[in-house]
Image (tube, rainbow, N blue to C red):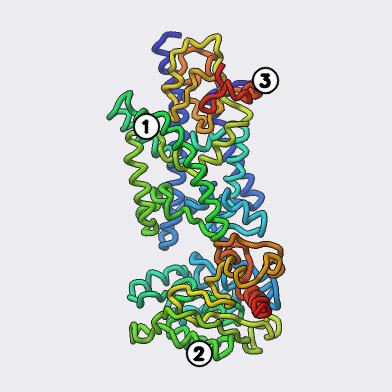
């Protein structure tokens, strides 16, 4: 295979994910718009309508406590949200946070803005935040998740809606978005020009839940050291700044299973960085603290 | 086993398609609420629909159907004409009407109206008022006690007389809630009228806790400060208790419990401690 055809093949493979992302973005945009119009009495033929809460798995996750204890859902959350939450958890258990990397429309939106940022700043893009600070900030989303869960449990309401930039993006025209939501959306838009997926990295409560599954997912990213040429193409391609090139298996809590680092996409050597079923021995090696750094297993 | 980008795409799309289709077949794929409020779980009204669960997304027809009365009554009460309109349109209509600060006509007003019309228990927010048109309907067909309707009428909103007709909220300590029995001729499906209907009549703008008096703003910490043990509280709430900082009413609403009913039991416990 020539270099040119190999490059085209990789580009084509990467585009598959972009097409899936765009499809989910369009589906969510159309159905949520139809839901708002339907509330105003404007019905669009052949288009199913569903509010953003009905198609967001976070509502299902934060409803679990109430559902288990009282058999009811948090206000504005519907059964479909619970279905998506369960689906998301099963997928995460098997493949990690594929919902973040392949499905979430807000992640896609940030990636699109990131494309602009990459053109503006070139190689500097996604490398503005100092490593040490970045590492600490990435735990913020767990605090956000804890706060959202606690407030939802004690109030029975979707407290996060008022601060949620995702909700603001798809409802900015409805008059139902709080000022804090607009501020959060504006901040994400600006930050996305400098950092890839800033909301996913630092603040997304659902990303926090999904990210935990990286620690024990069945299928994971493995780098085959004997064939690796240490070109670091995998690390450079990672939107979440994970140092794949020095890892044996990626167990970083921020991996979004986008497969951009794999030999299908960024890695130039076949069968070197792949998504595979992880054998027990690889999992065991992760348990050695001396070998771990940034949540990834080193050789 | 290796997964390529192409196979991952198939897995993700397939999982969503099959998952949603499967949930749909099993009846779990519900993207809207059922428009059927939850039922009251305890007391003599157990099994009847709970006014507290009326949502802004319900239409006037949904409310009338769920509580078994003629939709014309609620349309007349709130000056609406189309029974397919949603209840949450009230907030926009009366918000634009320029209500005095501290009072509100919205979904909670509908819950209060339904409670008074049917005799079912409900504790409304302090700031909730009804339009005078609703009072006229209640005087004609309301199942709740006349004194209770009078209390709500005292602060009803009259669009013709604007702010003057609405009693302004007071910042004094909240007075005890009025606890009145509904008329014997309550909703046919409901039990005898011995159970209390509880509706707040105070209009306190701010929460000023009066020791030993349970209101819609009381927290679990205040209950404990007033002498109730966790065991006491759990004996009323069915073995569960919220965090200290939680407002009892909100916590109960979040957990499917009926504040207006359990409040009476908690207040009895508080009174016994005095």
The residue identified by callout 3 is A281
Residue for point 47% across, 43% down: A204
Picture quadrant where residue B253 is located: bottom right
Q: Distance between the residues labelled 3 and 1?
A: 35 Å
Task: Where is residue A179? Give x, y as percent.
Answer: 35, 56
Using the rendered image of the protein, determine whether residue B36 is visible from the camera's viewpoint: no
Q: Residues within 10 Å of mark 2 (few under 14, many from 20)?
A: some
- Tell us which disc is closer to us: 2 or 3: 3
In the picture, the quarter occupied by the N terminus of chain B is top right
Q: Distance between the residues labelled 1 and 2?
A: 64 Å
Q: Give the farthest residue toward the left.
A: A120
Residue for point 53% across, 80% down: B200
Check the residue under mark 3 and report the chain it is in: A
Using the rendered image of the protein, determine whether residue B98 is visible from the camera's viewpoint: yes
User: Foreground residue, A17 or B99?
Assistant: B99
Check the residue under mark 2 and report the chain it is in: B
Picture quadrant where residue A74 is located: bottom right
Q: In this view, does A34 lie above or below A196?
A: below
The residue identified by callout 2 is B150
């Amino acid at each position: 295979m020539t270099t040119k055809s190999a490059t085209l093949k990789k580009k084509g493979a990467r585009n598959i994910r972009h097409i899936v992302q765009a499809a989910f973005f369009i589906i969510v945009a159309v159905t949520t718009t139809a839901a708002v119009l339907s509330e105003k009495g404007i019905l669009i033929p052949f288009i199913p309508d569903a509010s953003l809460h009905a198609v967001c798995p976070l509502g299902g996750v934060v409803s679990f406590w109430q559902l288990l204890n009282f058999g009811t859902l948090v206000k504005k959350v519907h059964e479909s949200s619970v279905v998506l939450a369960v689906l998301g958890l099963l997928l995460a258990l098997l493949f990690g946070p594929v919902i973040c990397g392949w499905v979430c429309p807000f992640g896609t939106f940030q990636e699109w803005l990131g494309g602009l940022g990459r053109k503006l700043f070139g190689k500097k893009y996604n490398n503005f935040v100092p490593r040490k600070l970045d590492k600490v900030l990435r735990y913020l989303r767990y605090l956000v998740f804890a706060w959202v869960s606690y407030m939802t449990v004690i109030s029975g309401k979707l407290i996060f809606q008022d601060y949620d930039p995702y909700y603001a993006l798809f409802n900015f025209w409805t008059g139902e978005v709080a000022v804090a939501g607009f501020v959060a959306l504006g901040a994400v838009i600006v930050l996305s020009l400098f950092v890839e997926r800033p909301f996913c990295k630092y603040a997304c409560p659902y990303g926090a839940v999904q990210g935990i599954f990286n620690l024990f997912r069945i299928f994971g990213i493995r780098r085959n050291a004997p064939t690796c040429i240490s070109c670091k193409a995998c690390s450079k391609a990672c939107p979440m700044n994970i140092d794949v090139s020095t890892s044996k298996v990626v167990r970083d809590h921020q991996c979004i299973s986008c497969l951009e680092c794999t030999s299908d996409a960024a890695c130039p050597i076949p069968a070197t960085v792949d998504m595979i079923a992880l054998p027990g021995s690889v999992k065991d090696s992760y348990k050695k603290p001396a070998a771990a750094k940034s949540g990834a297993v080193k050789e | 086993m290796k997964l390529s980008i192409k196979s991952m795409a198939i897995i993700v799309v397939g999982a969503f398609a099959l998952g949603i289709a499967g949930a749909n077949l099993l009846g779990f794929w519900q993207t809207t609420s059922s428009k059927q409020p939850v039922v009251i779980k305890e007391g003599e009204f157990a099994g009847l629909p709970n006014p507290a669960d009326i949502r802004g997304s319900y239409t006037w027809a949904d409310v009338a159907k769920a509580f078994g009365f003629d939709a014309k009554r609620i349309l007349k009460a709130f000056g609406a004409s189309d029974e397919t309109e949603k209840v949450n349109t009230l907030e926009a209509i009366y918000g634009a009407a320029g209500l005095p600060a501290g009072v509100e006509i919205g979904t909670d007003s509908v819950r209060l109206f339904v409670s008074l019309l049917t005799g079912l228990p409900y504790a409304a927010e302090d700031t909730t008022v009804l339009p005078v048109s609703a009072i006229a309907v209640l005087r004609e067909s309301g199942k709740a006690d006349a004194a209770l309707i009078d209390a709500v009428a005292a602060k009803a909103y009259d669009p013709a007389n604007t702010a003057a007709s609405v009693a302004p909220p007071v910042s004094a300590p909240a007075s005890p809630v009025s606890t009145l029995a509904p008329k014997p001729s309550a909703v046919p499906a409901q039990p005898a009228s011995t159970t209390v209907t509880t509706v707040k009549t105070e209009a306190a703008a701010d929460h000023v806790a009066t020791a030993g008096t349970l209101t819609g703003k009381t927290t679990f910490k205040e209950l404990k400060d007033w002498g109730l043990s966790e065991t006491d509280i759990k004996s009323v709430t069915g073995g569960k208790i919220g965090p200290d900082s939680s407002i009892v009413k909100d916590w109960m609403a979040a957990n499917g419990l009926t504040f207006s009913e359990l409040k009476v039991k908690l207040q009895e416990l508080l009174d016994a401690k005095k």
